[in-house]
Amino acid sequence: MYFLAAPEGGESTHNPIIPIWQEIVVGSVAFAVLCFVLMKFVFPRMEQTFQARVDAIEGGIKRAEAAQAEANQLLEQYRAQLAEARTDAAKIRDDARADAEGIRQDILGKAREESDRIIAAGKEQLAAERATIVRELRAEVGTIAVDLASKIVGESLADEARRKGTVDRFLSSLESTGAR
């Protein structure tokens, strides 16, 4: 093993496989300082950053769940209001139909009343015209009957009171004969 043997001129040469102890000390101190700085300043900062991200994500999830729950609640309220609105609309429709039927019945009742009033007025007018025609016919029949009776009897029935009594008796006898 030639490379493990001491050099020939009394000089020591350094073996490249075995590190120099001063480098090991400096490297260890530098590594310790680096670890100290990382543990004291960097790792806590990274932990805070990771924790902030976790909180943000979990908070976002919680906010999303809360928003979803609120949206579901609003959806249920909307559906309830929609069902209530449909019920109210059906009630309003039914009320409108009932009102329309009531108005229809009122109009029909008024039309019947008006029809009955017109029929009654027509009957009254017919009765009045009949009475007028009967009076006119009585007077005319009375005049004709007096003239005829005067010709038959041969005497003049000019006396008004007498003539009226005769005519009334004659018409009464005619009415009683027609009623049988």
Image: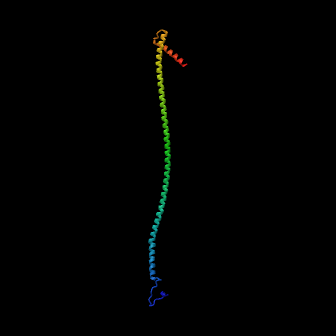
Residue 48: where, in percent of width, then height? 45, 67
**x, y (%) of residue 90?**
50, 44
Residue shown at 49%/47% (left/top)? 86
How many labels sit on residues?
A: 0
Residue 82 lies, with reference to residue 60, above or below; the image says above
Question: In this view, which residue lies farthest toward the right?
Answer: 180
Q: Is residue 70 above or below residue 87?
A: below
Residue pictured at 49% horizontal, 57% vertical: 68
Q: Nearer the viewer, residue 65 or 147?
A: 147
Q: Outermost residue, top direction?
A: 154
- Residue 98 placement (x, y as % from top left): 50, 40
**Residue depicted at x 49% and y 49%:** 82
Way the structure is coloured: rainbow
Q: Is residue 39 above or below residue 179?
A: below
- Residue at x-position 45% and y-position 73%: 38
Quadrant where the image shows the C terminus: top right
Q: Position of residue 43 (x, y in %)?
A: 46, 71
Does residue 65 lie above or below 117 as drawn? below
